[in-house]
Image (spheres, coloured by chain):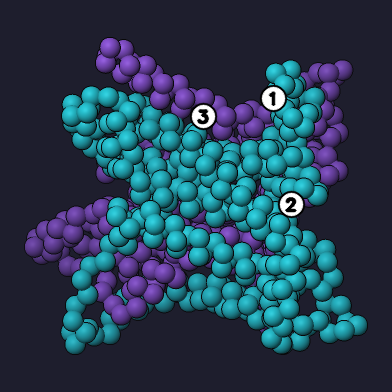
Chain colours: A purple, B cyan
């Protein structure tokens, strides 16, 4: 009897898991299917008359503005990832490896932005950009998006890198020192390579968060358009099928890159 | 790939005993490491939040829409709460429901990934994160079409007489479904992270002691995953209750508006709406911080702190 229930229990968890994964992928599949739709308002009605078409895949930039918004999103994502990963990693090192006054306060300062709804972050940045920073010449646009994205990615980078740092055995560093390595080469040859997987994860997370952000971007972007904003704004007029092509391609590229990074990391060993 | 999972750590601050005050000296290395990040957070998080608070107390110049003067106008908060309290209730309710459903869906997935997936574990982990890259706006719009009146889901439910209002889109059901869907990964990853750390041998021992699978789950597996559940519920509830995209794409204008929709339209569509929008934002932030603190105190005290 026990083996029977266990047999069902084992299968049950896996079946439920696959169903949930299917649920996660359903809209992605929908996006893929409708990238072949030959209709102006591509995401609403499937055009049976002319059947599936490849023309949007052959001309992904065919809809006005779609590729500009994608380029903006990629630029913002890369800049935000670079800066937030560097600043966040430095912060994580300080929080884990250093003793200093105000450590509790620093932890709170890192945590509270994550516990603040995005709309409040966006609203507060909008008020400061409009009422304060515009006086020193910073207008809403590309750079205000980058600034905002760095801010909200920073906390996620810190917690990711900090978790990796906390799981490292400090005795490894001590062993290096015992073997007459100076602090600099201990850091470059021992600490940094060990922390790297955490930093890479943090960078990928930052990029994903930045690339998919709409709510904060919507507040601070002015006339600049990122890819999610492009989709949201064009929803009422009808989303061009090229947006589906790009959305699905980004998904494939991201999966490819993640798989690649996994292979590289696992080859290097932990 | 334990990427998004880490906020679990965030909620369990492991405080090391501080050295006695007399021994502390100014730590230059720490200062230099902290300086850029902390400065960024102060200038672009703390200062804007303080500014938002001052805006929430500003008054309009009569006759000059879009101009405000510094004031202590508590009236903005009164307006915000008197006029928009149903939106607050709705936001917390929808956020809570979405968190509950996301938990119900996420747990089996996280459990299977941690204990049953074997070498497929990393593949499944990638599958959880990957949909992020097809913009969540595109996916939410896809849901609108999937749940549309003449779509498969709505017709099936109608045939079974399970759909009282005859439709899904433009109702609270669609909004809660959208919120559940969009924030599901934020629930899966922390639960997975805490289950992954658990030793399967402990669960086997639980099976040997209790026999019954359910008892083992309730007394051994579930408590071990509580830190992850706590982090996951927070990472789902906070963005879900502050969201406006799902309500505007899947809901209707009248009956499903959330507080996020009000804040957004007060900022962008109502002339002179800044102070009320700011007081709404500030109230939302305060309500969520209070709820989060109570929740962490209530459920986190034994396991976490």
* Residue positioned 60% across, 75% down in the render: B48
Asked if the residues shown at circle 2 and circle 1 are in contact, with their CB atoms under 8 angstroms apart, the answer is no
Q: In the rendered view, tell whether residue B133 sits above or below residue B9.
A: above
Q: Is residue A234 visible?
A: no
Check residue B257 in the rendering and tell me which mark sits there, or answer none: 2
Q: Nearer the viewer, residue B145 or B130?
A: B145
Q: Give the number of the mark in front: 2 or 1.
A: 1
* Residue positioned 50% across, 65% down in the render: B290
Q: Which residue is mark 3?
A: A21
Left-right relation of B262 to B188: right
* Residue positioned 28% across, 12% down in the render: A1
Q: In the rendered view, tell whether residue B110 sits above or below residue B267.
A: above
Question: Looking at this rendering, what residue extends furthest in the right direction?
Answer: B63
Q: In the rendered view, tell whether residue B207 sits above or below residue B94.
A: above
* Residue positioned 31% across, 32% down in the render: B217
Mark 3–mark 2 Cα distance, whole angstroms, equals 29 Å
Kindly identify which chain the residue marked by label 2 belongs to. B
Check residue B162 in the rendering and tell me which mark sits there, or answer none: 1
């Amino acid at each position: 009897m026990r083996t029977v229930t266990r047999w069902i229990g084992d299968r049950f968890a896996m079946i439920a898991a696959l169903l949930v994964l299917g649920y996660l992928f359903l809209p992605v599949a929908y996006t893929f299917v409708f990238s072949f739709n030959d209709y102006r308002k591509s995401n609403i009605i499937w055009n049976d008359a002319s059947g599936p078409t490849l023309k949007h895949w052959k001309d992904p930039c065919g809809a006005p503005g779609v590729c500009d918004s994608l380029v903006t999103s990629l630029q913002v994502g890369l800049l935000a990832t670079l800066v937030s990963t560097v600043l966040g990693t430095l912060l994580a090192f300080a929080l884990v490896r250093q003793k200093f006054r105000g450590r509790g306060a620093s932890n709170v300062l890192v945590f509270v932005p994550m516990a603040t709804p995005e709309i409040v972050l966006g609203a507060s940045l909008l008020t400061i950009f409009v009422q304060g920073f515009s006086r020193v010449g910073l207008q809403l646009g590309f750079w205000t998006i980058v600034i905002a994205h760095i801010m909200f990615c920073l906390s996620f980078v810190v917690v990711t890198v900090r978790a990796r740092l906390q799981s490292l055995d400090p005795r490894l560093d001590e062993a290096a020192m015992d073997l007459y390595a100076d602090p600099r080469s201990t850091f470059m040859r021992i600490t940094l390579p060990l922390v790297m997987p955490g930093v890479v994860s943090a960078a990928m997370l930052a990029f994903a968060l930045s690339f998919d952000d709409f709510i904060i971007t919507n507040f601070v972007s002015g006339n600049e358009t990122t890819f999610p904003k492009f989709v949201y704004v064009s929803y009422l007029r009808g989303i061009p099928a090229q947006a589906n092509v790009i959305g699905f391609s980004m998904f494939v590229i991201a999966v490819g890159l993640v798989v690649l990074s996994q292979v590289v990391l696992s080859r290097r060993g932990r | 790939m334990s990427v998004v999972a880490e906020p679990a750590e965030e909620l369990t601050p492991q405080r090391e005993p501080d050295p006695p005050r007399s021994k502390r000296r100014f730590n230059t290395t720490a200062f230099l490491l902290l300086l850029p990040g902390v400065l960024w957070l102060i200038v672009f998080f703390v200062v804007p939040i303080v500014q938002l608070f001052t805006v929430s107390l500003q008054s309009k110049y009569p006759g000059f829409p879009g101009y405000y003067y510094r004031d202590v106008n508590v009236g903005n908060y009164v307006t915000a709460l008197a006029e928009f309290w149903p939106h607050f209730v709705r936001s917390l309710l929808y956020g809570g429901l979405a968190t509950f459903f996301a938990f119900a869906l996420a747990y089996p997935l996280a459990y299977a990934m941690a204990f049953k997936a074997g070498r497929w574990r990393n593949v499944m982990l990638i599958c959880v994160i990957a949909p992020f890259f097809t913009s969540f706006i595109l996916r939410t719009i896809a849901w609108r079409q999937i749940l549309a009146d003449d779509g498969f889901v709505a017709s099936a439910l109608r045939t079974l007489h399970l759909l009282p209002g005859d439709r899904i889109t433009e109702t609270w059901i669609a909004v809660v479904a959208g919120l559940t869907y969009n924030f599901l990964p934020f629930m899966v990853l922390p639960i997975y992270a805490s289950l992954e750390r658990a030793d399967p041998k402990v669960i086997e021992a639980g099976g040997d002691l209790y026999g019954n699978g359910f008892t083992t789950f309730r007394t051994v597996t579930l408590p071990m995953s509580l830190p992850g559940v706590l982090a996951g519920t927070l990472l789902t509830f906070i963005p879900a209750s502050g969201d406006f995209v799902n309500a505007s794409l899947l809901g209707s204008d009248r009956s499903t508006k959330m507080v996020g929709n009000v804040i957004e339209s007060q900022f962008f569509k109502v002339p002179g709406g800044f102070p009320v929008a700011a007081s709404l934002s500030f109230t939302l932030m305060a309500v969520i911080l209070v709820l989060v603190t109570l929740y962490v105190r209530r459920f986190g005290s034994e396991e976490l702190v």
